[in-house]
Image: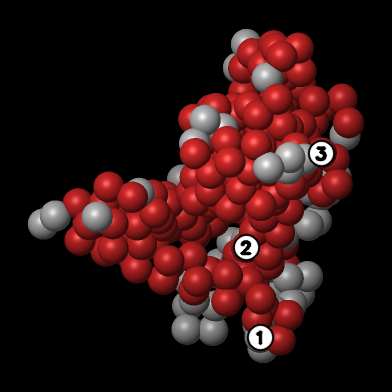
Amino acid sequence: MSKKSRGQNSLWIGGGVVAAILLAALLTPILPFSNPEAQRLSLQYASPSWEHPFGLGENGVDLLSQVFWGARLSLGVGLGSVFISAAIGLLLGSWAGYKRGWYDDVLMRIVDLLYAFPGILLVVALAAVLGPSVRNMMIVMVATSWAGYARLIRGVTLSLREREYVQAARAQGASTWRVLVHHLWPNLLAPLVVQMTFGLGGAIMVESSLSFLGLGAPPGTPSWGQLLNQGREVLTTSSHVVIVPGLALAFTILGLNLMGDGLRDRLDPKTRA
């Protein structure tokens, strides 16, 4: 099988998985089983059944409803943080790569400083300082992930700024912003979209990790990380409490990675040729 065929298969499979999860998250509020607060204390940690296909969790809450609402939280936080981080990285990275000089030096030293710390430790430390909330979780994720987008965009901009069409625009007196918006940014979208796809999977993993540690969504908010934390205490007796959100998290990240691989192969000029 050729690289192009593998890329198309990955794109279709990953895109299908992501589309199904996104559709389920969007339709969650109108689904008949979508009450994540309904409790059945007498059936706490009950095994999967026809009435409750994913079983029940802590306080007898339906896991199917919890997983669907957790998908809304994970995708919402992930998409929000990724889009903000990508926008910051696109703006700062393209400006630094095009203008060079002291601005480029300062930006890259800041990026190097952020990369000097282990990523997960920096995320946990900032989340612990700010406190558990969805807003603070997004702030932490943006503060620790924009540097990757900026470094990527800056590197691609360095190679594009010497192209003939950029030189021609500059010779015609085009301003810096005009060159960036009309000549560089359209050519930066392909690598940026691929990076965002992989970044979304990482953002969902970070959100689940923070919620697992009690530093993410407030207690009582449906979250895959909180479900994993609840199931940790009953792993040997009610393993479905861990398996269900764990599989949801694994399939989501797998689908995003496959879609990212497919997009990378699809948008690669050599593969298209």
Residue drawn at point x = 53 percent, y = 44 percent: 165
Q: CA distance from mark 1 to mark 2?
A: 14 Å
Q: Which residue is mark 3?
A: 139
Is disc 2 placed on a helix, strand or loop? helix
Q: Is residue 127 left or right of residue 249?
A: right
Q: Which residue is more in the foreground, 40 or 16?
A: 16
Please report the residue visible at 64 percent of the width from the left and 13 percent of the height from the top: 112
Q: Position of residue 213 (x, y in %)?
A: 69, 35
What's the residue type where badge 2 is placed? Ala
Picture layout, residue 73 above or below residue 116 = below
Which amino acid, by three-letter code, is at mark 3?
Answer: Ile
Residue drawn at x 19%, y 51% as measured from the top left: 3
Q: CA distance from mark 1 to mark 3?
A: 31 Å
Q: Earlier in the sequence, mark 1 or mark 2?
A: 1
Q: Secondary structure at mark 3?
A: helix
Q: Quadrant of the N terminus?
A: bottom left
